[in-house]
Amino acid sequence: MAKNVLIVESPSKAKTIKKYLGKDYQVLASVGHIKDLPTKELGIDLENNFKPKYVTVKGKTKVIASLKQAAKGADMIYLAPDPDREGEAIAWHIANTIKVDDSKIKRVLFNEITKKGVQYGIDHPRAIDYNLVNAQQARRILDRIVGYKVSPFLWKTLYSGLSAGRVQSVALRIICEREAEVLKFVPEEYWNLFADLKTEHNEEFRAQGVKFNNKTLKIINQKEAETHTKALENAEYKVVALTEKTTKSSPTPPFTTSTFQQVATSRFRYPPKKSMYIAQQLYEGVEIGGEPVGLITYMRTDSVRISKDAADAIRDKIKRDFGEEYIPKTPRFFKSSKKNIQDAHECIRPAKLDLAPEDVEKFLSKEQLNVYRLIWNKFAASQMTPAQYKNKTLDISANKYLFRAKGKVLIFDGYLRIWNSKDTSQDPIPAKIEENDLLNLTKLETEQKFTKPPARFTDGTLVKELDLLGIGRPSTYAAIISTITARKYIEKDAGKLKPTDLGMTVNKILVSAMPEIFNVEFTGKMEDELDEVESNKKDWQDLMSEFYTPFEKSLTKMEEKRLEIKQSLQEETDEICDK
């Protein structure tokens, strides 16, 4: 029998890790959580300091029996679920269930499922971190209380089967409020003015009217457009300024969970749930030449941190592939612009920097390759030199008007060599043109336009908004969107998220009933307080008490307003029911 037992939560991860550890280790999978709150009752003792009641997850009896059996004869048990709050809670439940002496249990973290990453984890074990466990436990209990206490209000007000969620309902509110902005938006008319001009060398180009009497040119209707056009027909067009300057475009940081989901949505139209599922496969291990290999680091992270080893390795590869001019003199490290990041892991990056996308292409599905190439290229680009552009601006006077033409030419691609090879720069400005040159007018043209409403959210832009507002955490974005979609509170229309009639109604009920709970500020504050529990600055039961006392009062007020809210949703019609 193996001396050591290592327990992860995923069978595919277990298979990859087994390859690195050898015969002294038995590697088993818990297949996710083995304990959770009961499904048919609240499962929280509100009178006894919010003590949770954990029960065995349905279908996990055999898994638990096998874990207990393996643990009996082992010298050491290593608990290695995912390196985050959720994984810490799974490890805690396993430790409590297998019932062996604490001295035989160690918690290990694998930021990457490679030989180096696994060995590092085994060499640096620690005890279970109860601050992480308590942060996860507090979140789970908060969500259970809100869902269990508020959902019945929806049933009585609208109909049975509806549900409310502490974070999902706020995401729904954000989508509904954007929809309200779109629906009430009144387009405003405006006109653009263009002059097609020719130099004495017969080079043609177009400039746009930008100023009139030294003020920004604003044209609001066709009559004004025609007045300006008439005033310009016989004007003298003269070059009054030609400026050239070189600008740089620097690469952005490597991926966090939020930015990865945003880009995967915009590039491949993958919903967050799908992009995370594919990333999980790459993290846990894919068969490469007959052996499972972990290809990326852990994909739930809010950090842009890069290890020096990884930065040095990718810089060496860039230098070999593209030349020394493509790497800065020193590695580039990034700092997060957000406050309250957990920074538990590095950014999302390739785990094996000797395996470029083209090296593993034949072993991956099309979707796996898309995601791996995206992560690889983003990380490599972050360590490359800036792109350089030559920018030109040409100002032309015409009576009291000023026209402007702009040009932009890519002169060195830098990181764009691999991140965005499509060059959208263009230079419409004639090569042989100088200040004080007189120009010939060939045509004046006006163009009617209308202002546009705020854009509806996509999966990616909603993730960006949630991240910006501090709502949810890297592990929750995908679940938030998939939950409100599954409940038919939102739907997709040409890739845009729109609330359904049901979603609008549910949002109206919740915001009317409990405005102090279902709002952005409160939800963001709760995330901050959960972070304080994780960093041992706040007791989780104190957090629960501070939440529940005002929440209970809100529940009472909400019940008092129920009939009023129900009546506000009803609409009289002249239709007669045939029943």
Image (cartoon, rainbow, N blue to C red):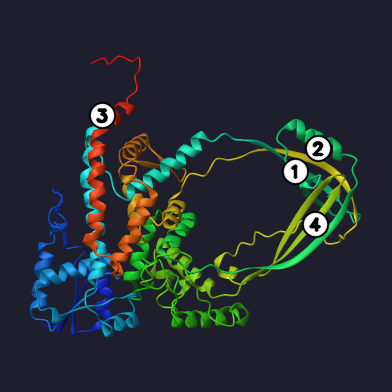
Name the N-terminal-most of marks 2 and 3: 2
222 displayed left or right of 48? right
Secondary structure, mark 1, is loop
Disc 1 and disc 2: Cα gap in Å?
A: 10 Å
- Give the image location of residue 407, x and y in percent: 74, 59
Q: Is residue 299 left or right of residue 40?
A: right
Q: Which residue is mark 2?
A: 228
Give residue 288's position: percent from left, percent from top.
36, 74
Residue with the mark numbered 4: 394
How far apart marks 2 and 4 lie (CA) works out to 21 Å
Mark-to-mark CA distance, 2 and 3: 60 Å
Question: Is the C-beta separation of discs 1 and 2 under 8 Å?
Answer: yes
Q: Is residue 311 visible?
A: yes
Q: Earlier in the sequence, mark 4 or mark 3?
A: 4
- The residue singled out by tag 1 in the image is 217
Residue 186 percent across, percent down from the top left: 57, 34
Which of the 4 image quadrants contains residue 305? bottom left
Callout 2 crowding tier (Cα within 10 Å): few <14, some 14–19, many ≥20: some
Q: Residue 525: which numbered mark, if any?
A: none
Residue type at mark 2: give it: His
Residue tagged 3: 563
Q: Residues within 10 Å of mark 3 (few under 14, many from 20)?
A: few
Calculate the distance from the C-alpha at mark 4 to the C-alpha at mark 1: 17 Å
Q: Position of residue 300 (x, y in %)?
A: 36, 65
The three-letter amino acid code for the residue at tag 4 is Leu
Task: Report the front residue among 152 and 71.
Answer: 152
